[in-house]
Amino acid sequence: MVLAIDVGNTRIKAAVFEEDTLLEVFVFQPELLQKEIEKILKKNKNMAHLVVASVGKIDKKAFLEWENRLIVHFFSHQDVLPFQNLYATPTTLGVDRMVLAAGATLLYPKKNRLIIDAGTCVTYDFVDADDQYRGGAISPGLRLRYESLHNFTAKLPLLVVEKPSHFIGNSTHQSIHSGIVNGLVYEIAGFIDEYAQSFSNFIIILTGGDTDFLAKRLKNTIFANSNFLLESLNQLYLYKLNND
Ligand SMILES: Nc1ncnc2c1ncn2[C@@H]1O[C@H](COP(=O)(O)OP(=O)(O)O)[C@@H](O)[C@H]1O
Ligand SMILES: CC(C)(COP(=O)(O)O)[C@@H](O)C(=O)NCCC(=O)O
Ligand SMILES: [K+]
């Protein structure tokens, strides 16, 4: 059994895997890390491996206390990967993006793949059919957009994400919802269109905390899977065990 942990900039996501099968997902705040892992281990006595991809602030040391019970692995740029990394600065590529690119390469062989992760930030990653990672884009995530409008202005309130009721925002609240939600949907649709001009065929995977909210607003055919990073972590770990 493998316990896969994704430390993002907002939340920690954890999943229990038996071979290829995802058994259970846990989502929690960084402060609860110790308690949550203990709970998961208590429930799953056959856990043998703990694998981590972190772009968050959590210290590696937080995981070391389990080293006497589990094989602990932190993914990094030193790991063997199923794709060739063409990023000009490969060591600054987010480990989460690296793992997503690996998961897409392994789970969707011989295809052009665009992975969109709508988390704290929205990241776009492209791996072509020859398994070359080309890079992508980084933009502010949905909640970050709401917080930025509030934090960097005097008059704008902090709102929670909501479906805009008016495309032509008829109040401050509706103008913000329309600007942020429609703006992000147009951004994603625009990126997809631009990729479509260079690549006649590619699959699109949408993941991250805003997957469901965004998937129903996008017209393109996409694989919407909020657990794709966790599944990619497990896939890359199985790949590592077979290739080390
Ligand atoms: N309970 C929640 N707490 C925080 N963000 C949430 C929650 N539920 C959904 N979200 C959405 O998830 C996004 C963050 O996604 P997440 O995958 O948790 O980020 P990260 O991987 O960067 O930690 C936010 O933009 C927010 O709109
Ligand atoms: C872009 C990110 C902040 C996204 O983080 P997330 O939204 O998943 O919390 C992370 O992938 C990161 O720190 N990247 C480093 C820069 C790069 O990927 O080029
Ligand atoms: K992201």
Image: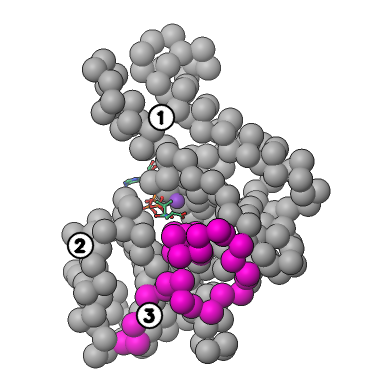
Determine crowd level at label 2: few under 14, some 14-19, many 20+ residues with C-alpha closer than 10 A.
Answer: few
Label 1 or label 3, whichever comes before in sequence order = 3
Mark 2, secondary structure of its residue: helix
Mark nearer the viewer, 1 or 3: 3
The quarter in which the N terminus is drawn is: bottom left
Pinpoint residue 192: horizontal percent, then vertical percent.
66, 41
The quadrant holding residue 106 is bottom right
Residue corresponding to mark 3: 73
Residue picked out by circle 1: 162
Could you say whether the residue bearing mark 3 is in a helix, strand or loop?
A: strand
Residue beneath the point at 46% across and 13% down: 169
Residue occupying image coordinates x 57% and y 50%: 136
Disc number lying in front (3 or 2) = 3
- Cα separation, mark 1 vs mark 2, equals 28 Å
Q: Residue at x 46, y 77 (%)?
A: 78
Does residue 39 appear in the picture of this structure? no
CA gap between label 1 and label 3 equals 38 Å
Residue tagged 2? 32
- Find the magenta span and give its range: 70-98
- Res 158 → quadrant: top left
Of residues 204 and 75, the one nearer the viewer is 75
